[in-house]
Image (tube, rainbow, N blue to C red):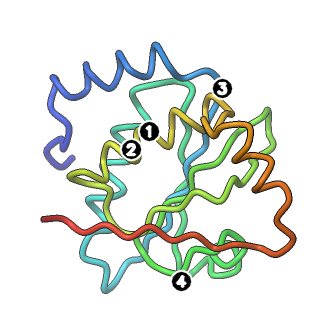
Amino acid sequence: MAERLLNDQIVTQVRDAFDKQLKSPVHVLFFGKEDDCDYCGDTRQLVEEVVSISDKLSLEVHDLEAEGDLARAYNVERAPGLVIAAKDGEEIRDLGIRFSGIPSGYEFSSLLQSLILVSQRDSGLEKKTRQTLAALKDPVNLLVFTTPT
């Protein structure tokens, strides 16, 4: 086994946050590939370590190339790719949350916050914003790009 990516102090902090804020199950789908993927191994290990912190989190591992139909169904085009989905019993509900690349540095807190928001089944958006979004007639694809500094 590779050396842990999360030290004991970080695991304790994340566990405390999860214990206080996770409400409902969350399912993470990891899409990696064997070749030509510099961060697939580290991303998978990171997600495995995070998911192991709470029994409200589960993980499914997939190969982007070997399972191309599933990747396309979840709109995952690059590896490593993550889908953060709600889990209700056996049903996996895709809420459209994706990570492309390794969620390290500042993106690590975005990953944790995404897991918490999905678990709470509440986006935190104000009522007026929800009404505006509900009135949209055409699909909207919102992409947020971050880069390590």
Q: If you read the primary sequence from the N terminus, does the residue marked by circle 3 or circle 1 appear first?
A: 3
The residue singled out by tag 1 in the image is: 113
Q: If you read the primary sequence from the N terminus, does the residue marked by circle 1 or circle 4 appear first?
A: 4
Helix, strand or loop at label 3? It is: loop
* Identity, as a three-letter code, of the amino acid under mark 4: Glu
Side of 115 where 125 appears, left or right: right
Determine crowd level at label 1: few under 14, some 14-19, many 20+ residues with C-alpha closer than 10 A. Answer: some
Helix, strand or loop at label 2? It is: helix
Q: Residue at x 41, y 32 (%)?
A: 52
| Residue 48: mark | 2
- Where residue 14 appears, as percent x and y from the top left, is 32, 26
Label 4 to label 3: alpha-carbon separation: 31 Å
Side of 84 where 134 appears, left or right: right
Establish if 48 lies above or below 78: above
- Where residue 65 appears, as percent x and y from the top left, is 53, 83
* Identity, as a three-letter code, of the amino acid under mark 1: Gln
Establish if 2 lies above or below 30: above
Numbered disc in front, either 3 or 1? 1
CB atoms of marks 3 and 1 within 8 Å: no
Label 1 to label 4: alpha-carbon separation: 29 Å
> Where is residue 118, by image quadrant?
top right
Q: If you read the primary sequence from the N terminus, does the residue marked by circle 2 or circle 4 appear first?
A: 2
The residue singled out by tag 4 in the image is: 65
Q: Residue at x 24, y 76 (%)?
A: 38
Establish if 145 lies above or below 96: below
Label 2 to label 4: alpha-carbon separation: 21 Å
Q: If you read the primary sequence from the N terminus, does the residue marked by circle 2 or circle 1 appear first?
A: 2
Label 2 to label 3: alpha-carbon separation: 19 Å
